[in-house]
Image (cartoon, grey):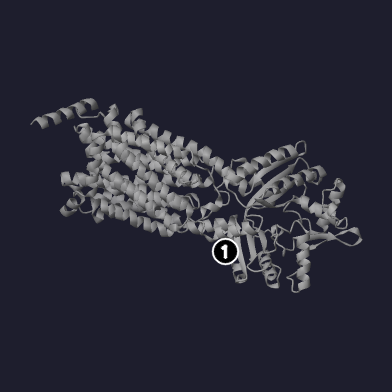
Amino acid sequence: MERYVRFVVRHRVAVIITVLLVTAALATQLRYLHLEIRRRANLPEGHPYVQIQNRISDLFGGEAVAIIGVVANRGDIFTVATLGRIWRITQELLDTPGVVERGLLSIASPYVKAVVPGADGMMDIHPLMDGPPTTAEEIDRLRHAIQEDKLFRGNLVSADGTAAVIVADFDDRLTDVAIAKRINEIIEPERDPTVTIALAGAPILRAELARYTAMIGILFPIAVLVIGLVHYEAFRTLQAMFLPLVTALLSVVWALGIMGLVGEPMDTWSAITPVVILAVAAGHAVQILKRYYEEYARLGDSNEAVVRSMTAVGPVMLIAGLIASAGFGSLMTFGITSVRVFGLLLASGILSALVIEMTFTPACRSLLPAPKLREIRREGQTRWLDRLLEGLAGLVIAQPRTVLGVGVFVIFIAAIGTFRIEVDNSFRTLFPASSHVRKDDALLNEKLPGTASLRILIEGNRENVIQQPEVLKAMSDLEAFMEKDPNLGGVTSITDHVKRMHQAMNNGDPAFYAIPDNPRLIAQYLLLYSASTGPDGLSAFVDSTYQRAVIRGLSKTDVADFARPFLDRLQRFAATRFDGLPVTVGIAGGALGVQIAMNDVVVREKIMNMLQVGGTILVFSAIVFRSLVGGGIVLLPLVLALVVNLGIMGWSHTWLDMTTAAISAMGISIGADFAIYFLFRVREEIAAGAPLEDAIRATLHSSGKAIFFVSSAVALGYMVLPFAGFSVWTRLGILTATIISVSALGVLTIIPSLVLIGQPRFLARAADGSSLGELRARSAAGAVRSASR
C-alpha cells in the first residue's frame, strides 16, 4: 500500500487527469439516462399471481387502465351538461393514440351496447348513447336503459346516479406519464363547480410516482449542502469540506454513467442512490482526511502525511468498501427488477468511490497547498464532540458490562415490537393521504365499485370451451360469490352478455336472465352479437377462439388484511366449483394479486437478503481479521441496529414493504464500515504499544470522531427526503437515518465493551507480541504505580 500511494503522489497530476478523463467519458453516457417507472419492473416475476396478471394483460390488456370518474356536485349526472361532458371526454379518448378502443368502457362509448328485445323475436343491439342527449325525453330513455341493465347500473353509473365512470385501457404506445398528461388535457376544459372529475388507476398512480421521483433533482443539491456543512463542522476548513464532496460527486457521476452505459432507466428506487453514494463516498473521504490531519500535525510534511494516512486507512477502506458493495450487490438476487437495478447501481457506485478515493483523493490532497497552522489548530481544537467522546470513553471503559446490559435491554424491547410488524405493499399508500391521488381514489371508491382491479383467467383445453353451458354457469357462480363481499363490485364477464342476450331473445322476461342449457343456442347468440358489433365486440372478455375468458372485478381496497383472506376464499370456491370441468382457473390477476405477491416476496426474500448481507459481512470480516470472533463482533452492533429499526416499525405501525425492506441492507452495509474502521484502529493502537483501555480511548477520539461525522452526514443527508412530502421517501429517510445512527452508536459502545470484556485474541497485534490480557494487566499495573507515586 505504501509503495502504491507513493506512486500516486509522485504522479499526482497524471492521476488527476486520468480520473477526470474517465469522469468525462462516463458523463457523456448521462444523456442516455432517463426516468421511467416501468409497468412490470416493480413486480416479482416468478410469483404465480404476477404470472397470471401478465398473461391476462398479454391476452386481454388491462396493464395500463385509467379510471375517470365524473361526479355531480348537485343532483345526478342525468343533465344535458354532465352527459355532454361524459360524451366529449369519451370521444377525445377514442381519438387518443394508444387507447384500446374495444376496452374503452363508458356509457358514451360506441362499443358499450344495449341489448334489448327487437322485432320478430330477435334482439336489438345498439350503442347506449348515439350522441349527447339534448332533450328530457332522450335523458329519460337513457336513465331507464341504465337502470334496467346490470352491466350499466352500479358499474358504469353509480347506484344513486350521481357518478359515472370512464375506464380507458392503453397499449404500449404511450408511457404512463404521457397517458396522465393526455387525460388531464382532455378533462381540464370540462371541469367546473357543478362536477368533480377524479382520476385513478395504475397509469395515473405511476405518473404521479414519476413526478415525485423527479423531485430528487431538487433534493440532491440540498443533501450535498447538508453533508458539506457536516464536513465543515468536522474539519473547520474549506479544503477538507470540499474535497470529500468533490470525491463523492465524481463517484455519483461514475455510477450514473454506468447506468446510462448499460441502458437501465432511473426509477423511484434508483433515483435515491445518488444520495446513498454521495454519503458513503464522502464518508470514506472523511476517514482519510481525519487521518491525514493527524499525520500532518505529527510530521509537518503534507506529502508524507498523505502517504502515512493512506497506508493506514487505505486497506481498511478497501475492505469496508468491498463489504458494503457486496452487501448492496446482494440486492441483485431480489426477484424484482427495480430492486436488482437498485442493488447494481449502489454496488457499482461504491466500487467507483473506492477507485476514486484510492487515486483522486490522495493525488488531489498532495497537490493542494498544505494546511496552514491556524487550520491545523482549528481542526484539532477540543470542542463539544471531544468532550462527549471523552465522557463516552470513560463510561465504556469503567462499566462495559452495564453498557452491554443496556444494549440487551434495548434489543429485548425492540424485539417485542418486531412481532407487531405488518406486511403490506398497497400502491396507494405510497402517497400521502393529503395528495390529490389519494383524495380522488377515496371519492371513486365511495361512489363507484372500486379502483383496485381483480382479474380471473378461465382457460380451456380446446377451442369453444367457453361456450359450454356448464363452464359459463360456473363462471356466473364465481361472479356471484365475489359480489357477496361488500368491497367487491364491477364484476363482469362474458356470462353477463350471454344472459342479456338470452333475456332479450325472450321478450325481455327477467326469468330468462340466465345461462341457456343449449351450447348451440349460446353459439348462435354470440354469432349474432359479433355480426352486430364486429368480431372484436367481446374481445375485452373472451378471445376469438372462445378458449380463454377473463372475469373482471373492482375492489374498494387492496390492503393485505382484506386481499389475502378474500383471495384464499376465492381459490377454495373455484377449486370446488370448477372441479371436473375442462378449464383451469387462474385467480389473482390485477392489483389485489400483485399486492399479495409483493408481500410474499418481501417476507421471503427479506429473510434471505438479511441472511445474505449478514453472512457476507461475517465471512469477509472473519477473513480480514483471521477470526470468526472478529466477524461476529463486526456483525453484532449491526444486528442491534436492524432489530431496533424493525422494532420501531412494529411499535409505530409502519408497514414492511419494498421500501422499508431495502433499508436494512443499506443500513447494515454502511454500518459495517464503522465497525471495521473502529476495530482496525484499535488494533493499530495496540500494535503501537498502547494498553487496551488507552487504545479504546484513542480510537474513540480518532475513528470515533470520524464515525460520528460520517453517520451524521449520512443521516442528515437522508433526512432531506421527507421534505418531498412523498410517503415512500419519508419512511426511507427517517428509517435509514435511524438505522445508520443506531449502527454508529452500537459501534461506539457495544464493540469497545465486548473487546474490554472478552479481550479477543485477533486484536493482539502488539509490537512485542503481547496478548490482550497481558496488555490489560500491564495497564493496570502502570495505573497502580502511577497512583503510588
Looking at the picture, which amino acid does disc 1 mark? Answer: Lys
Quadrant including the N terminus? top left
Q: Is residue 243 above or below residue 68?
A: above
Q: Residue 725's x, y, as percent?
A: 46, 57
Residue nearest the observer in this picture, 499 or 360 = 499
Q: What's the residue at 36%, 41% (across, down)?
A: 671
Q: Is residue 622 above or below residue 37?
A: above
Q: Residue 503's x, y, as percent?
A: 84, 55
* Viewer can see residue 771: no
Q: Return the residue at label 1.
A: 181
Horizontal arrangement in the rendering, residue 241 relative to residue 126 (left or right) = left
* Viewer can see residue 476: yes
Q: Residue 586's x, y, as percent?
A: 68, 42
Q: What's the residue at 71%, 68% (across, down)?
A: 78
Quadrant including the C terminus? top left
Q: Secondary structure at mark 1?
A: helix
Q: Residue 709's x, y, as percent?
A: 30, 48
Horizontal arrangement in the rendering, residue 208 relative to residue 315 (left or right) = right
